Amino acid sequence: MAEILHTQTENQPSSHSVIQPLLIENLVAGYEQRVLLRNLFFAVPGPAFVAIVGHNGCGKTTLFRALTGRIPYQGTIQVAGRDLRTVARPAAEGLLAYLPQRTTVGFPIAVRELVVMGRYRHHRFLGGYSTSDYALADQALQQVGAAHLAMQDFTLLSGGEQQLVWLAQLSLQEAALYLLDEPTQQLDVYYRRRVFALQQQWVAEQSKTILCITHDLDNLTSFPPGGYLLNLSRTTPTLLPLTPEVVLAEKAYLESEESFVRW
Ligand SMILES: Nc1ncnc2c1ncn2[C@@H]1O[C@H](COP(=O)(O)OP(=O)(O)OP(=O)(O)O)[C@@H](O)[C@H]1O
């Protein structure tokens, strides 16, 4: 099941100070003898879409593992002004909403019931979800183009349909930072475009900040100004403006023998 993570509401800095959604300083992370992220620095200054690109195995998901506290790391990660080292369970405490690459559900459940769980943090005790929670779930399903699936058994859906349902659930969470690991991986061309448009909408209308791992560079060329791109296959990855020119240049780099040899 996709992780349902809470929004931090306590001990936050004053709303008068400018809080960066994400600050990463000198991050070093990897596995035992293999360091994948070396001295990574970047800051997302305000609500924005950030595309994380790079070759297979370059460390994109590893970055998300560090952000969600699943692997140890050196350096500093601040989410919404909070140093993740000072948060016992950074993901579970609600700074982040995370959609992993693969999620499974081992029991039959109606799509609508799964989506409404995105309202989890409003229901810490045994009470059920309210009519307004279900209305939000229906709205979320509509937004991702999956309203027609509401009453179906989630486990019987196609991989692409299931992905749309997870996105609907994710959209109901109110986190400072959203981590999406290849959300369009199983989607057809129509839904791929739609899911990227949806993420643009989340940023523009709901001031969300999204880190989105993707190999779908073609769809990144149509993003409006204001987003960023981070290519983790570069020797020194830096946050670049997400413009068509930058996307094409990074795509050309990733297709080049020069970049492949590095890996
Ligand atoms: N627990 C682990 N122990 C050792 N190595 C691991 C572990 N998990 C992942 N790796 C390796 O680390 C490398 C980076 O993995 P990661 O999942 O971050 O890649 P990625 O950039 O997300 O790739 P992709 O685009 O294929 O999803 C891979 O070579 C992988 O085999």
Image (spheres, grey):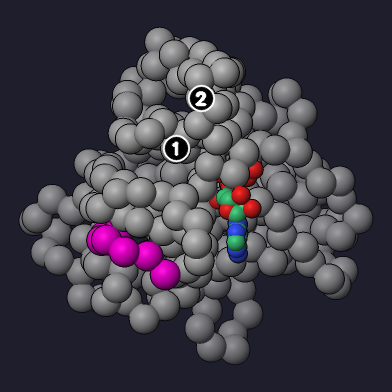
Residue 119: tell me if it is visible: no
Horizontal and vertical percent for residue 29? Answer: 41, 58
Q: Earlier in the sequence, mark 1 or mark 2?
A: 1
Q: Is mark 1 within 8 Å of ligand 1?
A: yes
The part of the chain drawn in magenta is 72-79
Left or right of 234? Residue 118 is: right
- Identify the residue shown where x is 27% and y is 76%: 86
Horizontal and vertical percent for residue 27? Answer: 31, 55
Q: Quadrant of residue 148?
A: top right
Between the residue at mark 1 and the residue at mark 2, the CA separation in whole angstroms equals: 11 Å
Horizontal and vertical percent for residue 69? Answer: 44, 69
Label the magenta part by its dominant secondary structure: strand
Q: Is residue 158 above or below residue 119?
A: above
Q: Residues within 10 Å of mark 2 (few under 14, many from 20)?
A: some
Residue at the extreme left? 16
Q: Amino acid at mark 2?
A: Ser
Does 122 lie within the magenta span? no
Residue 85: tell me if it is visible: yes
Where disc 2 sits, the SS reads helix
Residue picked out by circle 1:
232
Q: In the image shown, does 247 or 151 lie closer to the viewer? A: 247
Residue picked out by circle 2:
259
Q: In the image shown, does 57 or 197 lie closer to the viewer? A: 57
Q: Amino acid at mark 1?
A: Leu
- Identify the residue shown where x is 84% and y is 71%: 106
- Identify the residue shown where x is 79% and y is 66%: 105
Q: Is mark 2 within 8 Å of ligand 1?
A: no
- Identify the residue shown where x is 51% and y is 47%: 59
Left or right of 242? Residue 106 is: right
Residue 146 image label? none
Horizontal and vertical percent for residue 178? Answer: 45, 52
Q: Is residue 76 above or below residue 189?
A: below
